[in-house]
Image: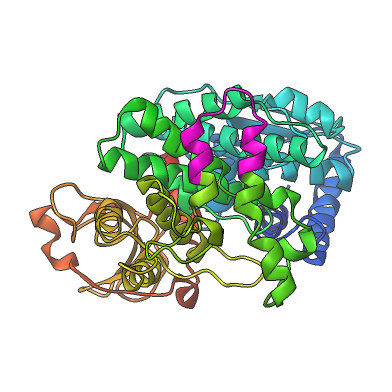
C-alpha cells in the first residue's frame, strides 16, 4: 500500500478531528474531512484485512508504516489518542461514516452521554467495525492531570445535564471531584495549569467551570488556605455559573451584544446558582456564598445589586479574578480569545475597582511573568510556547521551542529552561499572537503534558 495514500488518510482523519475540536458537532466543515477519511479507509480496507493505527515508541504507525513527525505534523492526532489512553485503533472492513464520527467524538471527549470507560463509549456509539487497545497507564503526574481534567469535564457535563432535566446534581459527585483536583494541585502546583489553557468553543461552559476551579484552587494554594476552605473555594469555582443552566440558551449563546432585557436575565444567574446549591444536600455554605457573590466587584458595584452593602466573602473576589482570566482567554459566542499577557493587563487595569488588589498581585505572581500558554519571541529570533513557570526566575519560564530562527517549524519542539546559564541567548523579547505564525498552542501544551 503506498505511503502517499496512507498519509492522505491520516491527514483527513486529523483534519476531521481538528474541526470537531474547534467547532460545534454540526458545523459543516466536519463533513468534508469526515467523508474523505471514510472514503480513504474504505478503499484501503478493500484489501480485506484490518488497518491498525497505533503509537509505538513515540512514533505514529499506520498499517506498519511509521510517521515520525509526531511533534509537528501529527501532533494533534497523537496527543489526542494518548490523552484518551488509547494505544491502537483497528479499522475493519465495512466501517461507515457514523462509526468514524463516533471514534472522533470519543477522541475529542466531552460528550455528556459518554461513560468514562472506553469500552462503554465504544458500545454507546455503536462502533462495530473498529476496535481499540488501551495503553498501559503510567502514574506520572501529568498523565494524572490529563485524566483528572477529562473526568472533571465529564462530571460538570453530567451535573449540568441532570439540572437541565430537572434533577438536582449530586453534592458528593462534585465534591469528590474537587478533592481530586485539590490533591493534585497540592502535589504539583502547576500540573493542571496547562490543562486550563486547553479550550473548546463547543464545550466552553464545561471547560470554563473546570478551569475556574483549577485557578481558584491554585490561587488558594498561593494564599495558604486550609484544606476545607480550599475545597470550598474550588467548589465555588466549579459551580459558579451553574445558574446559567436555568437561563435561556438563546441568551447564553447569543453571538452579539445582549439587549437590556437579556442583560437583566443573565444577571440573575448568581442568584439562580445559589438557589440550586441550596437544594443540593450537604453543600458547603461557603461555596454557596461564593457562587452568589462572584459578580460583585471589589468596589461593590456589580450584581446582584442587593449585595452591595452586604459582607462579601473575600474569596469571592478571588473567584471573580479566576472567572475573568479564563473568560478573557477563551473564545465565546460574542468574543474572540485574548492572549494570556493581554488578560493579565486587563485584570491589572481593574485592580482596586473590579478586583481586590492583593489578590490581583497574588494571581499574577501565581501565573508568572509569562503565563502558561503564552507565545514568545526570543532574542535569537526563535519562537516558543511557555509550558511551565520557573520557581527560580519568574522572567525565565520553561518553553517548548516551536519555530527556529529562520521561521521554520521545529519537528522535535525541544523543551528548554530559560533560567539555565547555557540558555542566555534565549532571553524573551516579546509576546506575540500565535495565530499570526500558525502555531497551535493547545497542541503544544498537550505535547508537553504527555511527554
At 73% from the left and 31% from the top, the residue drawn is 168
Lateral position of residue 306 relative to residue 121, left or right? left
Residue 314: within the magenta? Answer: no
**Is 281 included in the stretch rendered in magenta?**
yes
Pick whichever, 248 or 190, lies toward us. Answer: 248
Asked if residue 235 shows in the view, the reply is no
Q: Residue at x 50, y 73 (%)?
A: 435
Q: Quick check: 273 above or below 375?
A: above
Foreground pick, 187 / 426: 187
Q: Is residue 4 above or below residue 182?
A: below
**Residue 96, image x, y percentages:** 89, 44
Which segment is the magenta one?
274-290
Res. 428 in view: yes
Q: Residue at x 79, y 42 (%)?
A: 164
Q: Does the magenta stretch mainly form a helix, a strand or a loop?
A: helix
Name which quarter of the figure residue 202 lies in.
bottom right
Q: Position of residue 358 (x, y in %)?
A: 24, 56
Residue 177: give x, y in percent of width and height. 53, 28
Q: Is residue 278 left or right of residue 380?
A: right
Question: Toward the viewer: 326 or 40?
Answer: 326
Quadrant location of the C terminus in the rendered image: top left
Tell me: 259 left or right of 413: right
Query: Can you say whether 157 is above or below 26 in the image?
Result: above
Marker count (numbered): 0
Q: In front here: 322 or 192?
A: 322
Amino acid at each position: 500500500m503506498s505511503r502517499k495514500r496512507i498519509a492522505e488518510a491520516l491527514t483527513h482523519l486529523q483534519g476531521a478531528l481538528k474541526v470537531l475540536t474547534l467547532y460545534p458537532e454540526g458545523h459543516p466543515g466536519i463533513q468534508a474531512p469526515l467523508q474523505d477519511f471514510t472514503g480513504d479507509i474504505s478503499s484501503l480496507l478493500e484489501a480485506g484485512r484490518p488497518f491498525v493505527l497505533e503509537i509505538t515508541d513515540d512514533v505514529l504507525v499506520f498499517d506498519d508504516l511509521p510517521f515520525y513527525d509526531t511533534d509537528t505534523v501529527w501532533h494533534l492526532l497523537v496527543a489526542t489518542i494518548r490523552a484518551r489512553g488509547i494505544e491502537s485503533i483497528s479499522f475493519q472492513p465495512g466501517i461507515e461514516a457514523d462509526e468514524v464520527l463516533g471514534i472522533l467524538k470519543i477522541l475529542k471527549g466531552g460528550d455528556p452521554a459518554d461513560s468514562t470507560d472506553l469500552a462503554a463509549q465504544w458500545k454507546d456509539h455503536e462502533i462495530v467495525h473498529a476496535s481499540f487497545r488501551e495503553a498501559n497507564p503510567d502514574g506520572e503526574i501529568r498523565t494524572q492531570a490529563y485524566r483528572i481534567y477529562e473526568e472533571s469535564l465529564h462530571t460538570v457535563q453530567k451535573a449540568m445535564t441532570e439540572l437541565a432535566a430537572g434533577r438536582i446534581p449530586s453534592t458528593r459527585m462534585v465534591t469528590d471531584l474537587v478533592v481530586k483536583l485539590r490533591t493534585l494541585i497540592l502535589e504539583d502546583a502547576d500540573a493542571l495549569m496547562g490543562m486550563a489553557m486547553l479550550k473548546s468553543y463547543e464545550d466552553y461552559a464545561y471547560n470554563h467551570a473546570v478551569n475556574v476551579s483549577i485557578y481558584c484552587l491554585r490561587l488558594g494554594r498561593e494564599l495558604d488556605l486550609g484544606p476545607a476552605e480550599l475545597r470550598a473555594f474550588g467548589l465555588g469555582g466549579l459551580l459558579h455559573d451553574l445558574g446559567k443552566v436555568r437561563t435561556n440558551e438563546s441568551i447564553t449563546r447569543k453571538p452579539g451584544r445582549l439587549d437590556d432585557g437579556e442583560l437583566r436575565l443573565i444577571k440573575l444567574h448568581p442568584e439562580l446558582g445559589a438557589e440550586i446549591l441550596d437544594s443540593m444536600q450537604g453543600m458547603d455554605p461557603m461555596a454557596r456564598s461564593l457562587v452568589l457573590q462572584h459578580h460583585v466587584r471589589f468596589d461593590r458595584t456589580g450584581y446582584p445589586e442587593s449585595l452591595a452593602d452586604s459582607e462579601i466573602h473575600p474569596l469571592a473576589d478571588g473567584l471573580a479574578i479566576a472567572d475573568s482570566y479564563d473568560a478573557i482567554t477563551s473564545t465565546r459566542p460574542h468574543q474572540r480569545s485574548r492572549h494570556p499577557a493581554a488578560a493579565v493587563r486587563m485584570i491589572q487595569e481593574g485592580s482596586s475597582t473590579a478586583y481586590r488588589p492583593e489578590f490581583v498581585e497574588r494571581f499574577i505572581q501565581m501565573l508568572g511573568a509569562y503565563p502558561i500558554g503564552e507565545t514568545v519571541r526570543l532574542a535569537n529570533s526563535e519562537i516558543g510556547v511557555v509550558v511551565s513557570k520557573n520557581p527560580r526566575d519568574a522572567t525565565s519560564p520553561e518553553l517548548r521551542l516551536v519555530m527556529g530562527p529562520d521561521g521554520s517549524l521545529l519537528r522535535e519542539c525541544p523543551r528548554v529552561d530559560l533560567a539555565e546559564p547555557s540558555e542566555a541567548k534565549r532571553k524573551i523579547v516579546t509576546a506575540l499572537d500565535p495565530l499570526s505564525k500558525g502555531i497551535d498552542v493547545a497542541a503544544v501544551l498537550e505535547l508537553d503534558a504527555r511527554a
